[in-house]
Every structure is written in structure tokens, then in C-alpha cells.
């Protein structure tokens, strides 16, 4: 049985950027529903013995397991998304990650533009990610619906949820404003740096 991981901050902690109203729906309803659905789908199956990561890897791209994959990956993605934001976030990363961003994107501003473009051009529901790719360089990728870069062997550093349920109550249809706010005021560079250090150690 999986349980909904605790939110790493109070529901009003991201205000005024993302309101407690949004987080109440997004965390208590959407994220909880993915957990509940996953538990129901894997009950009395071999998947019930596996970790969340293993379920995602074993069900990815297999049409007979689409429902299990979608719910498992959405549990994983949302837990990662909550950690990708922090009250008083934003700014720039430090040290090695800052150097790697400059190396692989040319500048921090170029990284920002690429990340925003990925978030904006993800058609319909999905996610934009900063990842460490196979060649150990940083890349920006976007994924549809529940798709997650770990199934492609990439290591996510930070993500933004661009499903409408993530921003519609606060930003209506203005995904560009939501993405700009995420980068300016919410992104958790400490979380990204810690994921980057782990990726380098592998
Ligand atoms: Fe979401």
C-alpha cells in the first residue's frame, strides 16, 4: 500500500504565487486520487510487492499496464514536483550546477528561455523537466500526461507540472505567467543541486 507523502510545506506556504486553494485540490484531491487508484489497481498483484520506481519501470510503454503506469508515475511526478518548489524559491543555483548550466545552455538566461519554451509548448497536459541525460549533460525535456524521464534512463533535477489543474485556479489559462512565477519565485535550487550531486556520484 502506498500512502500520500507529506507535503514539504504548509498549504499556504507558496502564496501569493500558488494559493492554498490550488494546493488543496492539487495535493488532497489529484495526488491522493493517483495514490488511491494505484493501490486499487495493484491490490493482489505482484506489483504490490514492488517499489514505486520499480512499478514505473516495469509498466512503462506496455499497453496492458497503462492504468498502473499512469497512476504510479503521477504519484512519483507529483511528489517530485512538490519538492521542486519552496517558499522564497527562485534565484540561481550555486557552484557545480550553476557551472553545468552555463556549460550546457550557454548562460542561465538561455536555460530559463529553454525551460519556459518547453513548459509552454507541451501540448495539453504534461511536465517540463531539467534532467541529467545519458551523456551526463543537462537537458530540458517535456513529457506528456504521466510520462516521466526516469523511464528513459535520465535523472530529473527539477520539474514543473503543466497540467491545467496545477495553475488554472491561480493563473487561469496563463501558463506563461505560471512558468515565469515558478522560475522567479518558487523553483527549489537546493533540491536540484542535491539531485545533481547524486547523479554525478552514479
Ligand atoms: Fe498535477
Image (cartoon, rainbow, N blue to C red):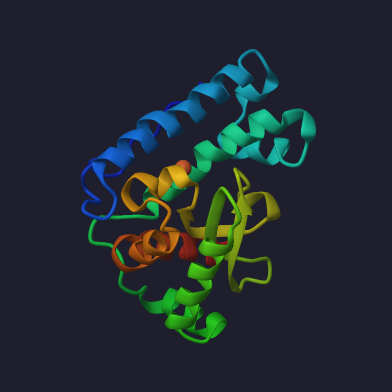
Question: For the view shown, which residue lies furthest in the front direction?
Answer: 173
At x 62%, y 54%, the residue is: 143
The quadrant of the image that shows the C terminus is: bottom right
Q: Is residue 22 left or right of residue 143?
A: left
Nearer the observer, 160 or 94 = 160
Whole-percent x, y for residue 125 in the image: 56, 48
Whole-percent x, y for residue 163 in the image: 50, 47
At x 62%, y 35%, the residue is: 70
155 shown above or below 66: below
Total label count? Answer: 0
Nearer the observer, 136 or 159 = 159
Whole-percent x, y for residue 166 in the image: 41, 46
Q: Is residue 25 left or right of residue 154?
A: left
2 shown above or below 161: above
37 shown above or below 157: above
At x 52%, y 87%, the residue is: 106
Amino acid at each position: 500500500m502506498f500512502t500520500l507523502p507529506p507535503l514539504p510545506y504548509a498549504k499556504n506556504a507558496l502564496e501569493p504565487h500558488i494559493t492554498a486553494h490550488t494546493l488543496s485540490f492539487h495535493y488532497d484531491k489529484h495526488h491522493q486520487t493517483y495514490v488511491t487508484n494505484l493501490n486499487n489497481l495493484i491490490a493482489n498483484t505482484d506489483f504490490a510487492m514492488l517499489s514505486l520506481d520499480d512499478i514505473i519501470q516495469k509498466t512503462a510503454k506496455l499497453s496492458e499496464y497503462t492504468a498502473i503506469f499512469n497512476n504510479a508515475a503521477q504519484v512519483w511526478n507529483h511528489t517530485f514536483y512538490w519538492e521542486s518548489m519552496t517558499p522564497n524559491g527562485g534565484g540561481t543555483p550555486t557552484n557545480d550546477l550553476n557551472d553545468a548550466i552555463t556549460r550546457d545552455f550557454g548562460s542561465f538566461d538561455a536555460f530559463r528561455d529553454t525551460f519556459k519554451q518547453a513548459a509552454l509548448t507541451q501540448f495539453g497536459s504534461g511536465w517540463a523537466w531539467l534532467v541529467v541525460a545519458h551523456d551526463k549533460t543537462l537537458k530540458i525535456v517535456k513529457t506528456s500526461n504521466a510520462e516521466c524521464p526516469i523511464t528513459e534512463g535520465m535523472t530529473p533535477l527539477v520539474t514543473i507540472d503543466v497540467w491545467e489543474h496545477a495553475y488554472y485556479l491561480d493563473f487561469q489559462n496563463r501558463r506563461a505567467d505560471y512558468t515565469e512565477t515558478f522560475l522567479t519565485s518558487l523553483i527549489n535550487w537546493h533540491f536540484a543541486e542535491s539531485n545533481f550531486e547524486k547523479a554525478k556520484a552514479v
